[in-house]
Image (tube, rainbow, N blue to C red):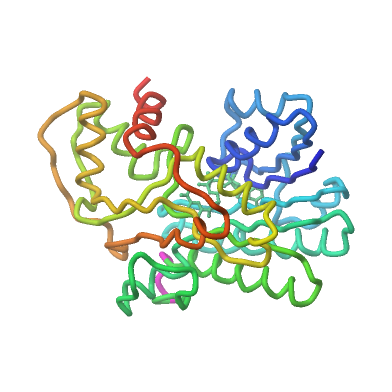
Amino acid sequence: MTVSLVTGAAGFIGYHLAKHLSEDPTATVICVDNFIRGERDNLYEDLTGRPNVIEYSIDLTKPDQLVKLPDNIELIYHLAALNGTQNFYERPYEVMKCSTLPIFYLLDRYRDSPSLKRFIYASTSEVYASTVRKFKWVIPTTENVPLSIEDPCNPRWSYGASKLHGEVLINSAHQSFNIPYSIIRYHNIYGPRMGDKHVIPDFAIRIKKGIFELYGHSDTRSFLYIDDAVKATVLCAHLEDTKNEIINIGGSLEISILDLAKKMMEISGLSGDMKLYPSPNGSVSRRVPSVEKLEKLVGFKESVSLEEGLKRTLDYYLK
Ligand SMILES: NC(=O)c1ccc[n+]([C@@H]2O[C@H](COP(=O)([O-])OP(=O)(O)OC[C@H]3O[C@@H](n4cnc5c(N)ncnc54)[C@H](O)[C@@H]3O)[C@@H](O)[C@H]2O)c1
């Protein structure tokens, strides 16, 4: 019976989340996107064509457009943001705008709503990446790590700064208007329909073309398959223990990008001479979340192994 609003529903996580929510026929799912990054492909058309899904193509940086949204929203999953490393460098102003203004406008729109039960905000490891890099903070990193931005004059940090701002803003809204929230820090979620910019789809598309080039091979990350990320997100949105908490959502297995690429080659059966290149300037060499809080508060455990998740993702990208 829950009425959920998913912003950024045409994007990667938003699409899978909205699809999952819409599988309950008693639920109503409101999908919002302005397609600055997300795609109106067949999958999105199928999703928004479902009887319990209502679509709004609106730009959340324009407050007059938010009045069109229904009043009776119970859960807001705010995932809309201008993501993508290239965007951080080339369009930092728009990155800041798309990742800050919508939060103000959504909070203003729903802060007095009697139906609102939780504001779920999608944050990122980028809010603490500078602390890990500059101050050699502990890895796996817990949620109480100090947040920082290494260099406000380097546009690379536009995204991290906007998300850091978002976390403070959500908490301020809670202090001022008693809005219940959960802040979710996603860490390298992967799966089908994730675009072509992240390391997994990027390498998949390259090897499909017979190009075995890999960037940032010695960096390490952990990855979480999209279905697990969606499950964890929905649990965080409903549980009492996750109210007004910040929670890491990610995988616990640390793997180098080179080993990840080798796994992808093995699973796909595609092989060739690898050409290795360093990661772009400003990249974070190690990033692994502590998922202790996720396990303790949410009782969440990964159900899709890296091998299985990569297989499903490669099936999608190599088709
Ligand atoms: N994918 C990950 O591993 C990851 C990691 C950390 C954080 N996050 C965060 O999770 C959220 C979802 O990530 P994703 O990978 O699905 O990103 P995505 O880029 O695929 O989706 C974001 C969507 O938001 C939409 N959008 C942007 N500005 C908008 C606006 N002004 N009005 C309406 N829609 C707008 C875009 O068109 C896009 O479809 C983002 O906030 C992202 O910062 C994701």
Viewport quadrant of the N terminus: top right
* The magenta segment: 152-156
- Residue 218 rendering spot, x and y as whole percentages: 19, 55
Q: 193 and 184: which one is in front?
A: 184
Q: In the figure, is residue 296 to the left or right of 209?
A: right
- Residue 110 rendering spot, x and y as whole percentages: 82, 59
- Residue 143 rendering spot, x and y as whole percentages: 49, 69
Outermost residue, top side: 319
Residue 78, placed above or below residue 125: above
Residue at (40% x, 38% y) in the render: 196
- Residue 78 rendering spot, x and y as whole percentages: 66, 53
Q: 153 and 5: which one is in front?
A: 5
Q: Is residue 155 magenta?
A: yes
Viewport quadrant of the C terminus: top left
Q: In the figure, is residue 33 to the left or right of 295?
A: right
Residue 88 image-quadrant placement = bottom left
Q: Main secondary structure of the magenta part?
A: loop
Residue at (18% x, 35% y) in the render: 212
Residue at (56% x, 41% y) in the render: 11
